Amino acid sequence: MEKRVGVLTGGGDAPGLNAVIRAVVIKGEKLGYKIIGIKDGWRGILEKDVCELNVDKVEDIHREGGTILGTSRTNPYKVENGEQKVIENMKQLDLYALIAIGGDDTLGVANKLCKKGVKVVGVPKTIDNDLSATDICFGFDTAINRVAESIDRLHTTAESHHRVLVVEVMGRHAGWITLEGGMAGGAHVILIPEEPFDIDEVCRIIKGRKAKGKSYSIVAVAEGALPKGDTKFFAQEEGTDAFGHVKLGGVAKVLEKEIEKRTGAETRSVILGHLQRGGSPSAFDRYFATRLGLKAIQMVKDNEFGKMAALKKGELLSVSLEEAVGKMKAVSKELFGEAKVFFG
């Protein structure tokens, strides 16, 4: 009898999710498994909302963004008897093992469940690229290309109108997308969560450009960036999600008003938002995500439970889920120093 292996995608979507699913299904069938898709992350397990996957259903999905399984930020540990429901429902669904594709929150749940005896394998998915146990996460390459392309386009309109444009980029606690996308796009100032910014210094840079005859400036700012001395995020609204995260957004609007007031330069803000994570994945993300899917189902075959597939120095390895969710990977002062060479 074929063993049934579940696969779910949790948290925010990232280009490459479908490539992971495709690889799990195609190799899984060759290894003798029946792959069961779990809809909308942990919600699908709690409500036993599943579907059978086969090669015909996933043949070309690697080219598509998003996830065919849907996703949510459902946290079983915020649901009454959630942990026990997951364990019982996995038995009722006859799931031998589970592949959880997600970031710190999704894999944190997987790690807790593993300690209760659930056979779980993790696949790292955080578009912010801030999981320390892997060198890179899929979706990140697509995101930084989106940011760079957007900033490329904004140069021409900003220069034509002699404006300052403040571009808000994803990044709650880590500034990887803003740093790499901003440098690639030629932003004149880059602001990230790891380095609280001084609004006076930002304005000095903009004024300095104008004094040199540069009629426009582009500021790339991570959504989680904070001014010096402040510890409160710029939030879109009150409240938090099931994992305790506030909905960020607003730093660009604040900067827009402050920069215009302090410099006299006409200033506009642009929030890239979901454009960064939507659409087709890059070739790199398709390839890398496919490799992670192949590795994950092989880990099931090899009984490497309680671990996550990871890329370390070019090699695909398995690392413990405990390590995967234990520490955030932040932009170093040295890397940010490289970006600052181009400020102004």
Image (cartoon, rainbow, N blue to C red):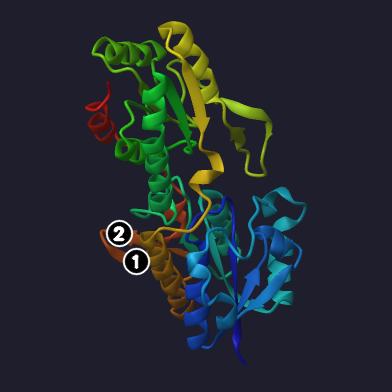
Q: Which one is nearer the viewer's eye here, 144 or 7?
A: 144
State if disc 2 and disc 1 touch (CB < 8 Å). Answer: yes
To which residue does mark 1 refer? 317
Badge 2, how many Cα within 10 Å: few under 14, some, many 20+? some
**Label 1 to label 2: alpha-carbon separation:** 7 Å
Could you tell me which secondary element the residue under label 2 belongs to?
strand
Q: Which amino acid type is marked by label 1?
A: Leu
What residue is drawn where x is 49% and y is 22%?
A: 268
On the image, the x and y values in percent for residue 97 come to: 58, 74
State whether residue 210 is above or below residue 246.
Answer: above
Q: Is residue 20 visible?
A: no
State whether residue 31 is above or below residue 309.
Answer: below
> Is 86 left, or right, of 127 in this rendering?
right
Q: Is residue 253 visible?
A: yes
Badge 1, how many Cα within 10 Å: few under 14, some, many 20+? some
The dot on residue 66 is: none
On the image, the x and y values in percent for residue 258 come to: 48, 12
Q: Which one is nearer the viewer's eye here, 236 or 116?
A: 236
Image quadrant of residue 208? top left
Q: Upstream in the sequence, badge 1 or badge 2?
A: 2
On the image, the x and y values in percent for residue 163 come to: 42, 19
Q: Which amino acid type is marked by label 2?
A: Lys
Please identify the quadrant where the C terminus is shown.
top left
Q: Which one is nearer the viewer's eye here, 39 or 185?
A: 185
Please identify the quadrant where the N terminus is shown.
bottom right
To which residue does mark 2 refer? 312
